[in-house]
Amino acid sequence: MRKGPASVPTLVLSPRYTSDSRDLRAAAVAAGWRVERLGGWRPPDRLRDHDVVLYGEPLFVEVIAAGLGRALIDAPFDWLLGLPERHRRRTIELTTMGHARTVREPVFVKPADGRKGFEGAVYGPDAELPSTEAQPDDTPVFTAEPVAWEVEFRCFVLDRRIAAMSPYLREGRFALSADGTWQADAGDAGQAAAYAEELLADKDVSMPPAIVIDIGRVRGRGWAVIEANSAWGAGIYGCEPRRVLDVLARACVSRDRLQPGDAPWVLDPVEVTGG
């Protein structure tokens, strides 16, 4: 019996070609999925009958999901603030760009909404924050005590288990070897895996069923969470693409198939207008 479109996942990609989208496409094809790369931001009506899995730039994915009646699973923007101190290991505050502009000592500043409206970095006298025209004073931002991250790893998490993990930075530089592979010292990789398991097993930490969590080792302090990212918009680095697809599938759900525990993690749909 031939499978219908609703029984086989369809990976829907944004118009922007990236190495990650190519790798995910190849993995999806190998797994027997359908794949469709859209040419614009308006999904064809026929995709409503498909089991859609989305990947691309965050706003693109949100627009397509709203157009197809899909729910997106994500962590709320203030998730990091709710972590116990043992998983943060530095001072973090939610404030405004206006307040950040008054801070005289070096401070790490990043957008609170995850849109990457400007680069999250340590800003000080020699590195000015974006102008008020680009980022008004009422723009929500996170400020954090500057720390030195020795190594950083990306974890695709599915139902509180590591689906795929990869190093991505070492002493602030991409952990990319000459042969194009992402590599880490065996000791660092073992420590990262052990800390990730500790984090996911911690009952004091709430966790979406599908999410990307970046972890790293703070010099002189130990392992901590760097940030959470939407699975459907995160780079995969050296993560196994087929395992990443499983996380993406859980992060994009038809609204009539949401599970009881999904409600706290469902992103508010963006408003899609005609035209």
Image (cartoon, helix red, strand yellow):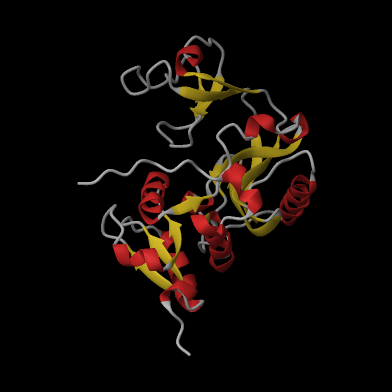
Which of 249/127 is in front? 249
Q: Residue 245: percent from the left, percent from the top?
A: 53, 64
Percent from the top left, x then y, of residue 98?
Answer: 45, 13
Q: Position of residue 157 (x, y in %)?
A: 64, 54
Residue drawn at x 43%, y 17% as measured from the top left:
138
Q: Is residue 98 above or below residue 260?
A: above
| Left or right of 155 on screen, residue 128 | left
> Number of numbered discs present?
0
Asked whether 256 or 3 is in front, the reply is: 256
In the rendered image, the residue lying farthest to the left is 275
User: Does the rendering let one see residue 212?
Assistant: yes
Q: Is residue 140 above or below residue 55?
A: above
Q: Residue at x 71, y 38 (%)?
A: 224
Q: Quadrant of residue 225?
A: top right
- Name the side, left or right, on which 264 lies relative to 219: left
- Residue at horizontal 57 percent and vertical 55 percent from the top: 258
> Does the rendering let one see residue 8?
no
Is 147 in front, or is 115? 115
- Identified at 78% across, 38% down, the residue is 204
Quadrant in the picture for residue 172: top right
